[in-house]
Image (tube, rainbow, N blue to C red):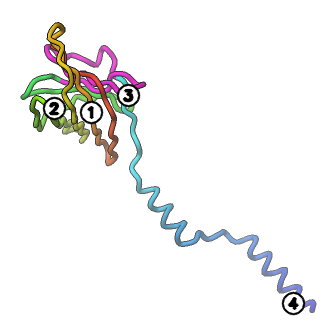
Amino acid sequence: MQRILSMTVLVFALAACSKPVAAPAEASSAAASSAVPASFKVEALTDADNDIQGCQVMLDQKGVGQVFIEDGVDTGAHGYIRVDGARYRVDLTTSVIDEKGGVRVFVDKKSGLTVTEALTTGAAHEESDSVEQSGSIVVAFKGVTQKIAVDGGTAC
């Protein structure tokens, strides 16, 4: 009897001193979560972030402010976006637009940042030489993609 009691105490002591081993499901989910790319934050542009002259497309995210601005031209356009506190200049690589709206893709080749603008054209205001636009921008950065609803328009 004493021998059984001694063995039981020994087993409990060994169990208390050993490191816990993760279950296979926990181990695989921990490895998967460490492989997830870090998120990023698109922030409002400041007045100093804009050096675009002429027609401009200005897009606001509700509750944040102006998050993307770009030339309102068909070729050679560039734009600006602020991600994690840094301003990025992106250049137009693709543009498919008509009178109803369209899709334009801007890229910063150095950082790999991509902004895909998908907009629907709204009301035109001839007195102010502007057109309302709404839709979304999809921002891809460091392996993470965010879709942001935007409103704004083109003004010349």
Residue 135: which disc? 1
Do tag 1 and tag 2 residues touch (Cβ < 8 Å)? Answer: yes
Membership of 55 in magenta stretch? yes
Residue 120: which disc? none
Whole-angstrom CA distance, mark 2 to mark 3, is: 25 Å
Secondary structure found at label 3 = strand
Q: Nearer the viewer, residue 141 or 4?
A: 141
Whole-angstrom CA distance, mark 3 to mark 1, is: 18 Å
Residue 72, x across and y down, in percent: 14, 22
Q: Is residue 150 above or below residue 30?
A: above
Q: Residues within 10 Å of mark 3 (few under 14, many from 20)?
A: some
Quarter occupied by residue 101: top left
**What residue is at 45 percent from the left and 56 percent from the top?**
34
Membership of 127 in magenta stretch? no
Q: Is residue 130 above or below residue 96?
A: above
**Where are the magenta residues, as a range?**
45-70
Sequence order check: which comes first, mark 3 or mark 1? 3
Q: Given the image, on which type of amino acid does mark 1 rest?
A: Gly
Sequence order check: which comes first, mark 2 or mark 3? 3
Q: Residues within 10 Å of mark 2 (few under 14, many from 20)?
A: some
Residue 45, x across and y down, in percent: 33, 22
Q: Is residue 69 above or below residue 23?
A: above
Secondary structure found at label 1 = strand
Whole-angstrom CA distance, mark 4 to mark 3, is: 67 Å
Residue 25, x across and y down, in percent: 52, 69
